[in-house]
Image: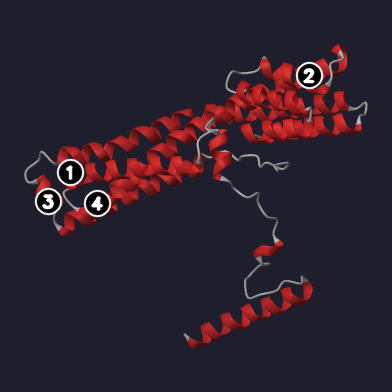
């Protein structure tokens, strides 16, 4: 046994020595330090709420709602199982439902935006090239005729433009309200064309619209393939909860929940249901675009 450990330690030491000389890696890890890897964009709760259409809701208000739901779920768990620890787990599980509902709303809103942006960009291209409208006028005209869910953001940006005539500030308002990667790329393209001019705006908008159209097509096909699995995932969630409620009416079901073994079984069951739910959701998650031009 000691010989095996010594051989492994010697092999790992040789690996560290070789990677330090040949590749310039530092540290005791098997690979480069995380600081040398490209950093992901910083996640902000405000962006998450804005993408769900709740840009006017403060993060603290949403946290207060989660607290109220947690208390209600814990009270229901205490009434059902008659023990404190399963009640706390039940409250945490109940508090996840508002998050899941807002994630679904965010997903639907982003799907709507992904389907709408290619048409909006194409209209922008026509208005700025064939019709001869100015870039701000074309943007706000397109936004006024866009999907109803996106119109408030364009209206707020237009108000900023009318008050300040600062196109960059107006685009910043639009970006903050939508928090959408396609909106960021479109706004950056329009801002550069507005400030520096140029004759290639038509081509750039056409390329961007085609890219967004292809991305929306692939995502729609992937969601269609996952529809049945997502329905089954929601349906299976109700089965253990129904079995737990039915156990109350069988023999001494309620008193069995209050024993130490019963509480351990309830905790294990809830933990397995939550773990399987999260794991299945992670497997079904489509890759999301990052906000490269976010400010």
Q: Are marks 2 and 4 in contact (CB under 8 Å)?
A: no
The residue most toward the bottom is 2
Of circles 3 and 4, which is in front?
4
**For mark 4, what is the residue?**
86
Q: Could you say which is closer to the camera, residue 42 or residue 241?
A: 42
Tell me which label, 2 or 4, sits earlier in the chain: 4
Q: Image point 15% across, 41% down: which residue? A: 247
Local crowd at mark 3 within 10 Å, few (<14), some, or many (≥20)? some
**Where is the C terminus found, in terms of image quarters?**
top right
Residue at the spot of label 3: 256
Q: Select label 2 or label 3 by which is in front.
A: 2
The mark that comes first in sequence, 2 or 1, is 1
Q: Which mark is residue 79?
A: 1
Residue occupying the point 45% across, 40% down: 62
| Cα–Cα gap, marks 2 and 4 | 58 Å
Tell which circle, 2 or 3, labels the residue nearer the N-terminal end.
2
Q: Secondary structure at mark 4?
A: helix
Residue, x 34% and y 32% (percent of image)?
235
Q: In this view, which residue lies farthest toward the front?
A: 163
Residue 285: percent from left, percent from top? 53, 40
Closer mark to the observer between disc 4 and disc 1? 1
Nearer-N-terminus badge (1/3): 1
Q: Residues within 10 Å of mark 4 (few under 14, many from 20)?
A: many
Q: Is label 2 or label 4 in front?
A: 2
Asked if residue 148 lies left or right of residue 251, the reply is right
Report helix, strand or loop for mark 2.
helix
Residue situated in front as seen by the camera: 125 or 197: 197
Task: Quote the CA–CA distance across marks 2 and 3.
Answer: 69 Å
Left or right of 235 on screen, residue 47:
right
How crowded pointer 1 is (Cα within 10 Å; few <14, some 14-19, many 20+) is rated as few
Element under disc 3: helix
């Amino acid at each position: 046994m000691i010989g095996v450990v010594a051989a492994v330690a010697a092999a790992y030491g040789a690996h560290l020595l070789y990677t330090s000389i040949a590749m310039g890696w530092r540290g005791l890890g098997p690979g480069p330090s995380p600081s040398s890897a490209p950093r992901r964009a910083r996640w902000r709760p405000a962006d998450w709420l804005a993408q769900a259409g709740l840009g006017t809701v403060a993060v603290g208000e949403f946290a207060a709602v989660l607290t109220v739901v947690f208390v209600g779920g814990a009270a229901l768990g205490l009434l059902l199982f008659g023990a404190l620890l399963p009640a706390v787990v039940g409250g945490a599980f109940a508090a996840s439902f508002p998050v899941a509902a807002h994630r679904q709303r965010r997903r639907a809103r982003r799907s709507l935006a992904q389907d709408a942006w290619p048409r909006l960009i194409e209209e922008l291209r026509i208005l700025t090239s064939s019709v001869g409208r100015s870039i701000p006028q074309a943007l706000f005209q397109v936004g006024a005729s866009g999907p109803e869910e996106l119109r408030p953001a364009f209206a707020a940006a237009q108000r900023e433009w009318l008050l300040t005539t600062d196109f960059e500030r107006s685009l910043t308002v639009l970006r903050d309200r939508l928090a959408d990667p396609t909106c960021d790329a479109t706004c950056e393209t329009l801002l550069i064309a507005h400030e520096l001019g140029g004759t290639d705006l038509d081509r750039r908008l056409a390329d961007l619209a085609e890219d967004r159209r292809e991305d929306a097509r692939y995502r729609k096909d992937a969601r269609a393939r996952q529809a049945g699995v997502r329905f089954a995932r929601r349906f299976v969630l109700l089965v253990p909860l129904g079995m737990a409620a039915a156990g109350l009416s069988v023999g001494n079901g309620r008193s069995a929940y209050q024993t130490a073994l019963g509480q351990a079984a309830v905790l294990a069951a809830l933990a397995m249901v939550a773990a399987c739910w999260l794991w299945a959701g992670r497997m079904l998650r489509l890759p999301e675009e990052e906000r490269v031009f976010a400010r």
